[in-house]
Amino acid sequence: MPVTKLHYFERVGSTMDVIHQLASEGAAPGTAVIAGEQLEGRGSRGRPWHSPIGGLWLSVVFRPPAVEGIEVISLRVGLAVAEAIQARVPKPLQLKWPNDLMLENRKVGGVLCEARWQGETLGWVAVGVGLNVRNPIPNELGAVAVSLSEFTPGITVEETAEPVLAALRALDLGNGRLAPAELDRFARRNWLRGRTIREPVAGEVTGVGEDGALLVRTPAGSDVSLRSGTVELAAMSHSR
Ligand code: BTN
């Protein structure tokens, strides 16, 4: 049984950089880094990730034999995080493809997956999870972002860290395809399902595929499978 360590830092640039460094030194799968705050937290698509004290800022090393696509990992991680903390939140935690955790139509967290290769071989995958637990949300983001504490006033970072870390360490990333049971679990939390989007393609979201792709039915009735891209809702998209 490999030794899985948890490294805690009061302040770092990004837990992703620290976990990549540890992985390059041979850290065992499940090794984790948590920071009280990040000064250079990063989000998907190269965006900065605001990470003040009061949030859960966590990265974990995985060493799967191969990755078919990072989308499947991102969806699996989001699902694991949502299920791990759902009991502490009175409203449904939902997942917005490909990497957002949503609470009452606002973003409460996100997942960032970064693979590192050694030649042709997969070295490791660093999985980062950011969760707004009790950190204040800047005024300008109040319409689009939320912290768990708005719905669970006494919630602490510690009580989210433990179940989230346990759930991530229990994940098996060996299967590059989502199993039918995982697709069912995702469907129950799929924030986009039934919504009309205009980007990256216009149509109605019908679900996700076993390869982690977003499935969209266009107005002409054809089914499109999206492996990447930023989703933008159509102005008239209904909210459920
Ligand atoms: C997203 O854009 O939704 C993904 C956000 C991921 C943020 C987390 S916080 C812990 C880890 N360290 C980082 O710098 N980013 C990820």
Image (cartoon, rainbow, N blue to C red):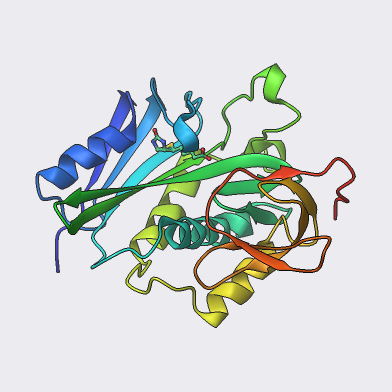
Q: Seen from this angle, which residue lies furthest front?
A: 220
Residue 65 visible somewhere in the drawing: yes
User: Picture coordinates of residue 13 (x, y %)?
Assistant: 32, 23
> In the rendered image, which quarter is residue 218 located in?
bottom right
> In the rendered image, which quarter is residue 63 located in?
bottom left
| Above or below for 205 versus 32 | below
Residue sitting at x 82%, y 64%: 220
Residue sitting at x 60%, y 53%: 97
Placement of the N terminus among the 4 image quadrants: bottom left
Front residue of this view, candidates 89 and 186: 186
User: Picture coordinates of residue 164 (x, y %)?
Assistant: 45, 54
Front residue of this view, candidates 83 and 97: 97
- Left or right for 45, reference 183: left
Residue sitting at x 59%, y 46%: 100
| Above or below for 95 versus 225 | above
Placement of the C terminus among the 4 image quadrants: bottom right
User: Picture coordinates of residue 98 (x, y %)?
Assistant: 56, 52
Residue sitting at x 48%, y 23%: 52
**Number of numbered discs visible in the structure rendering:** 0
Residue 43 visible somewhere in the drawing: no
Q: Seen from this angle, which residue lies furthest bottom?
A: 180
User: Picture coordinates of residue 191 (x, y %)?
Assistant: 71, 55
> In the rendered image, which quarter is residue 231 located in?
top right
Front residue of this view, candidates 138 and 21: 21
- Left or right for 15, reference 44: left
Q: Quadrant of ligand 1?
A: top left
